[in-house]
Image (cartoon, rainbow, N blue to C red):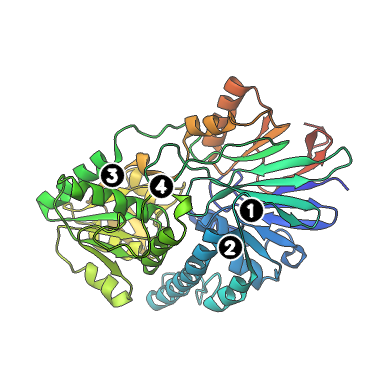
Amino acid sequence: MDPNLSFLGAAGTVTGSRHLLQIDGKHYLIDCGLFQGGRQLRQKNWDPFPFPPHQIDAVLITHAHIDHIGYLPRLVREGFHGPVYATDATCSLLEILLPDSAHLQEQDALYANKKGFSRHKPALPLYTRRDVEQTLPLLRPVRFRHPLKLDQLVVTWWPAGHILGSSWLQVEIPTFNGGSIIVFSGDLGRYGQEVMADPHPGWQADYLILESTYGGRRHEETPIKDVLETQIQWVTARKGILLIPAFAVGRTQQVLYHIRRLQDQGRISDLPVFIDSPMAVEASHLYCRFGDDHNLDINLLMDERQCPLRCSSTHFVTSVEESKQLNRMSGPAIVISASGMCTGGRILHHLKWRLPDERNVVLFVGYQAEGSRGRLLLEGAETIKIHGEYIPVRARIARVDALSGHADEDELLRWLATFQRPPSRTFIVHGETTASQALRDAIHQQLKWNTAIPGLGEQWILHGTAFMNSESPNNI
């Protein structure tokens, strides 16, 4: 039986990465993420999984962002009990992120029931901490660059430079004519960054599944520290609050690093910095444990005043009561909180308090998915709906793309140029339609590669030297 590949997520949208590889009666899921963004996308998380979870033999994870790992406890709840393979650092992050994700979902459901704004009676969490407890024992850590023999496959995790532990996967499949290689890019990082190391070069692939988050776009060249300095000076002068929605892993550490550099250079006042995320302090410790993944010179024995991930006055907020107190705090101050796209978590409560005040700034430091509150704010929404209430937007809204952990179009093309030969076909995923189309056009123009943009739910059969779309009568 010919292998086939099904696109069960991140097709026509950025989030919900789930790719199902089937070969000789075995089924492997590459990434298992949540859909994020507008209500229509989020609703897909509640749909029955399109393939029986108990028939999946293993899950292979590229990295620990929620849109790549956040559905795992739900998959376990629906019957999956196989191994979950990921790098050491990614497994360590999962042990932090998944319990927190379950806690947030339980808290959001509890809050929705208390306030009565949910359409569902009662509102329920997608999964619970008990589901996470059933998931974590399935984790199987792997090492970068060390091939894993998995049934008839050989899988290797290579550094992607996106966040701690992030990787792109090389999957070698034996066939009648000697074998083929499928590469899953995951999310690729940027080149020449101060925190994360460059993505490892590609080598060869017969078939490439390529992310396109920033297709058609190039990151701004304005230095990151210049943008941060401008916004920090704004709230300092007005005694406001700089509110930064940021994922606790990766982006929060980047922001802390650059604020610390500004303080050391005397370019900003030493404002108190509050990290309102129970995960962030644990994630920062992991940067000490896994020093080979990044460029920072830090270790577990380093004095806090020397650590590049600590500002001059850094406060890690853990309890709900401490988080509530931040909303009664006078400025100037900086608050960093999750989630990065404002789709849930403590950031929503801070937005409710801070958006109506023109002295405050909301600074977005990462990609904002279509339909997410972050995207709506960037697009100029005058009101935003949070917890069933419409909140007026009077605060200053700003963004800095230069802090993104995603490769832009030029950097994606730079990575593609490291392959020794063109793949038989490159599947462009993990992007909004316009971004995927823009990247496809750039690849055609510069590399002359054969590409396809699969739709959600499409299945492509590995057929000789090309894939056949199982929904189409014609070979592609």
Q: Tell which circle, 4 or 1, labels the residue nearer the N-terminal end.
A: 1
- Disc 3 secondary structure class: strand
Amino acid found under the numbered disc labelled 1: Arg
Q: Which mark is residue 398?
A: 3
Whole-number angstrom distance, CA of label 3 to CA of label 2: 31 Å
Q: Secondary structure at mark 1?
A: loop
Single out the residue that lies furthest toward the front: 301
Q: Which residue is mark 4?
A: 295
> Please, what is the three-letter code of the amino acid marked with disc 4?
Asn
Work out how far the residue at label 2 is from the one at label 1, CA to CA, in angstroms: 9 Å
Q: Residues under labels 4 and 2: Cα distance? A: 31 Å
The tag earlier along the polypeptide, 3 or 1, is 1
Question: Do callouts 2 and 1 mark residues in contact (Cβ within 8 Å)?
Answer: yes
Mark 4 against mark 1, which lies toward the viewer?
A: 4
Nearer-N-terminus badge (4/2):
2
Q: For this view, does 189 lie left or right of residue 260?
A: right
| Residue at (82, 45) in percent of width and height | 174
